[in-house]
Amino acid sequence: MQTDAIEARLTAIFRDVFTDPALTIGPDTTADDIAGWDSGRMIELIVAAESDFGLRFTTREVDGMARVADFVAIIARKLAAKA
Amino acid sequence: MSLCWLPDLTDWPQACAAAGDLSFDGFVRLASTRLDASRTNQLDRLLARRFPDGAPGAPGTRPVRLAVLSSATVAHLLPAIRIGGLRRGIRVETYAGPFGAYWQDLVDPDSGLHAFAPDAVLIALDAFHLSALGAEAALAHLRDLWRGVRERFGGPVIQQTLLPVALPLLGANEHRLAGARHATIARINHALREAADAAGVDLLALDDQVARHGRDAWHDPVWWLRAKQEVAPAAAPLYGDLVGRLLAAGQGLSKKCLVLDLDNTLWGGVVGDDGVAGLVLGSGSAEGEAFLGLQAYARDLAARGIILAVVSKNDAANALEAFETHPEMLLRRGDIAAFLANWDDKARNLRRVAASLGIGLDALVFVDDNPFERELVRAELPMVAVPELPEDPSGYADRIAQAGYFEALAITPEDRARAGLYAANAERTLAAAEAADLPSYLAGLAMRLVWRPFDAVGLARIVQLVNKTNQFNLTTRRITEDEARGLIDDPDAVALQVRLVDRLGDNGMIGIVIARRDGSDAFVVETWLMSCRVLGRGVEAAMLAVLAGAVAERGGRALIGLYRPSPKNAMVAGHYPGLGFTPLEPDGATERHRLDLSAYRPEPGPIRIDRG
């Protein structure tokens, strides 16, 4: 899956989790950019992404997720490994 | 491990967008859809946004202030607990204390817990923490906690059983290794049953849930290590629902009555078409055993105080005959407190069930294999619980069990006698309840009647439908495949096959009508039949419009409708008069009715007509 397709699906997940249908994200978006992105929301994001993309993140991968680009890269790598 | 008994809501984003001015009842309805962890949290936030001063709660429910005492992280469970309450109309406010400090929170009169002043307390200590104490000390600690809670706060105390999270060291004979965690947890859980009963504490039996779903579904080491969440975030919706059940049971809000459909729910097949002997039920086939499984579960529920009722689209005589004469039936007529087999819509019949039993509609669980009927009842009577069913009847009983509708905290001798009492009372009155708003529901279904003349592709299904339909069948005239093929190009016949499509899906070929020119300008309708699956939806009127159009195209000016009574087709005795036909002289046992096409105007109905 292309990175922009992954980012599009992540956008939908972020909109759901932050209950904001107009939310936009980019590769450099971090928790500082979105109001309410705390550790609880981070868990929601990860659980939702795992279920949406059908994969499981490792402890180390979750540790390394700070920017949206990190999400995209890890998801792309895991999907490629599955294919 | 989804809330699989609840229907999935496909237009979730739209529902969320409209939540700003949604009523509390609307929120209860949203909570009664298949929410995953993400939707559960979203709904909780939308509810708080909509009711900043707290949600009102449904009439007849009491708000609950629930404190969760835990040694692990439980913040991610609180939204799910609030939604588990909302699903039952209960407003639940929650409190979780500072991490790891439950004991201080309890004993310090200036703590957040005391400021919150709970009227219910859930003790959710993690298994790592408790099993480290050893079984005896863990139980003593819990007894101290229960006593401490009781001395300070009123209301129910709920104790979560331990999640079996520890890894085995020996294997199957783990209990032989002194002090092994795995065995200690099992020992604590075993002893908790008696200890909790003695202390008047109710259990939240997570170990039973793990036995069903597996440890991995409930506990995820990643989240335990990352956030000390013993219960995995994905399991939160079910956790919250389990807590909601206990709170509702404590307020007497659990369901009281199981209402069962008959055809393809309690037995396989359609009794009106297949006859009692043709039903799939009982030993001899795996599917027949599966239907018996639901009967056995219903019987066992009745034995512990759940009332049973039947609501089925059937002639009462056919339905009763199966109950009275089928040798494999486990349920008997006497087990059923309210028995409604007729052709009225099911929402109306469910109102009658509730009225005749003297219980609320919100005490009913309605089980039906037909998605159309389930949707109709949910739309008309949102307070009635209607579980989604798996495709295979072998899973029906299990689905009802998973939904936890009948959660109870205790069992009394009155419970065991209740079913009989209700049955006696219900004989008395089957009051007519107010009519459901059927037309608006039908309009919302976006039904399309798709018709075609007979063609080679449809022949097999046409012949099958004509030869097996008994109830909605005006003449019960059978047909061979050759005969049907001959009708394809017959200029003096109109032979139509009809499908019904709606927003729930394609119902397939559901109607056949055959009319022949009688030598003059009239066409005689020698066959008109419909599948009983689509009754009560205005399909007859739409079929008449198609038939009249096709006959007029052939130069016909009138329709002669025939009705030949049989033991099974009493339901269509009023078919032609209902459509505006005028009675003619009967031909022996066959009634004849006439409709002049010059005087016929199709009634606008809820069904769009398309040529297929």
Image (spheres, coloured by chain):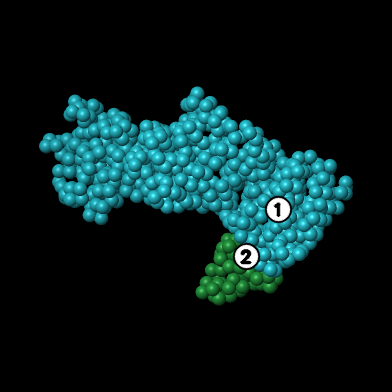
Q: Which residue is mark 2?
A: A25
Secondary element type, mark 2: loop
| Residue at screen point 21% across, 38% down | B526
Q: Position of residue B257 (x, y in %)?
A: 55, 36
Give the quadrant of residue B249.
top right
In the image, B196 versus B153, the foreground residue is B196
- Whether residue B43 can be seen here: yes
Horizontal relation, residue B391 to residue B302: left or right: left
Q: Tell which residue pokes out farthest to the top in this image.
A: B428
Q: Which residue is mark 1?
A: B190
The image shows residue B292 at horizontal and vertical percentages of 46, 45
Q: Quadrant of the N terminus of chain B?
A: bottom right
Q: Residue at x 41, y 45 (%)?
A: B281
| Mark 1 Cα-neighbour bin, 10 Å: few <14, some 14–19, many ≥20 | few
Q: Is residue B223 above or below residue B488?
A: below
Alpha-carbon distance for marks 1 and 2? Answer: 50 Å
